Image (tube, grey):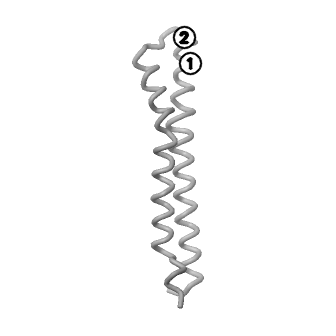
Amino acid sequence: MNRNIRLFLAVIVYAIGLLASIYVGGWVMIIKPVKGAICAHTLGTLTFYQLVVTVVKVFCSTTVAGFIWVLGYIASNHVFDSRDEQ
């Protein structure tokens, strides 16, 4: 594969990793649980277990998002590594 194709594929893989980390870390682990906890509180059905799970998800979201981003970064560097250029 030539250099431009590998560079393009590396950018695509990196972008997929970045978008997946934003989706999982931002939406799945922060916005969605907090929104559910607010709705449950408004309806008067919020349980202690639901509150604890929401707090744990919010605290762990940056770690999970960072892990997913790093996987995308490592995969993009595997596709295109500038040190291989001679």
Q: Is residue 60 above or below residue 40?
A: below
* Residue nearer the viewer, 85 or 30: 85
Q: Please tell me in which quadrant of the rendered image residue 42 appears.
A: top right
Q: Please tell me in which quadrant of the rendered image residue 14 appears.
A: bottom right
* Residue nearer the viewer, 36 or 57: 57
Question: Residue at 54% of width from left, 34% of height from top?
Answer: 30
For residue 39, the mark is: 1
* Residue nearer the viewer, 9 or 76: 76
Give the labeled residue for mark 2.
43
For residue 53, the mark is: none
Q: Are marks 2 and 1 in contact (CB under 8 Å)?
A: yes
Query: Which amino acid, mark 1?
Result: Cys
Query: Residue 25: image x %, image y %?
Result: 52, 42
Which residue of the protein is positioned furthest toward the left in this rendering? Answer: 49
Label 2 packing within 10 angstroms: few (<14), some (14-19), many (20+): few
Query: Which amino acid, mark 2?
Result: Leu
Q: Is residue 69 above or below residue 40?
A: below
Which residue of the protein is positioned furthest toward the top in this rendering? Answer: 44
Question: Residue at 46% of width from left, 65% of height from top?
Answer: 74
Question: Residue at 47% of width from left, 26% of height from top?
Answer: 54
Q: How far apart are marks 2 and 1 (CA)?
A: 6 Å
Query: Residue 34: image x %, image y %?
Result: 55, 26
Q: In this view, does 24 lie above or below 33?
A: below
Query: Residue 22: image x %, image y %?
Result: 57, 47
Label 1 packing within 10 angstroms: few (<14), some (14-19), many (20+): few
Q: What element carries label 1?
A: helix
Which residue of the protein is positioned furthest toward the bottom in this rendering? Answer: 86
Question: Residue at 54% of width from left, 71% of height from top?
Answer: 10
Q: What element carries label 2?
A: helix
Give the total of numbered labels: 2
Query: Residue 73: image x %, image y %?
Result: 51, 63
